[in-house]
Amino acid sequence: MTRYISKTFLQGLGAILPIVVTLYLLYWLATLFEDLVGPLVSVLLPFYFPGLGLIVALGLVFLFGMLMQAYVFRALFNWSERLVTRLPGIKVIHGAVQDLLDFVRKSQGDQGNQVVMVTVSLGDTEARLLGFVTREDFEGLPEGLGGPDEIAVYMPMSYQIGGYTLFLPRERIQVVDMPIDQAMRFAVTAGMSTTRN
């Protein structure tokens, strides 16, 4: 009976926890936008109601995205970004966030060929690890970091925020026809997640 109660509880927790965490993160993001933009909107506009700050913030983000499609605005933004990233400490934080966003942006497109299987030897046994191609061109990087026939593959660790970057010959990888977001979910849950659309 105890085992049945535990199993049922864990099954319910497994079903509801992802929904609760997702809703909480959306709530936190909406509250953050409202707290940042709301006071400014209440000063600039003759009327204000709760949620208007969030609406204005989302509109500003969309407008900024439209402006980034214009060459002149994009060049000006890149120039100002280079100035800001020269400040001590900012470059490291900005670079890490930018790289993460680039990875997420790539995962939204048709980038299935970036998911790969890497074969490694564990004594007498060969094992395969799931990885993600992060770089195929090493031009502009320090000499010796990557060769002409090598690629960089990120190997995530299950249930941890971390992993390893391996520099591998192309023939040591096998392309997997799988979207990056599904592969990442599969990797970080130690293969226990099921594919979801």
Image: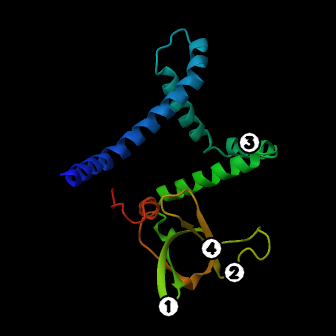
Location of residue 143 in the rendering, given as x and y in whole percent from the top left corner: 80, 74
Q: Mark 1 points at which residue?
A: 124
Pick the residue in front: 22 or 98. 22
Location of residue 135 in the rendering, given as x and y in whole percent from the top left corner: 63, 68
Q: Determine the residue located farthest toward the bottom in the rendered image.
A: 124
Mark nearer the viewer, 1 or 4: 1
Q: In this view, does 186 lie above or below 24?
A: below
Circle 2 residues within 10 Å: few <14, some 14–19, many ≥20: few
Residue 56 visible in rendering: no
Q: Determine the residue located farthest toward the left in the rendered image.
A: 1
Mark nearer the viewer, 1 or 3: 1
Q: Distance between the residues labelled 2 and 1?
A: 30 Å
Q: Earlier in the sequence, mark 1 or mark 4?
A: 1
Circle 4 residues within 10 Å: few <14, some 14–19, many ≥20: some
Give the residue drawn at x 64%, y 50%: 98
Q: Earlier in the sequence, mark 2 or mark 1?
A: 1
Q: Mark 3 points at which residue?
A: 76
Say the numbered circle drawn on residue 166.
4
Q: Determine the residue located farthest toward the top in the rendered image.
A: 46
Give the residue drawn at x 50%, y 13%: 48
Q: Of the residues shown, which amino acid type is indicated by label 3? A: Leu
Pick the residue in front: 12 or 151. 12
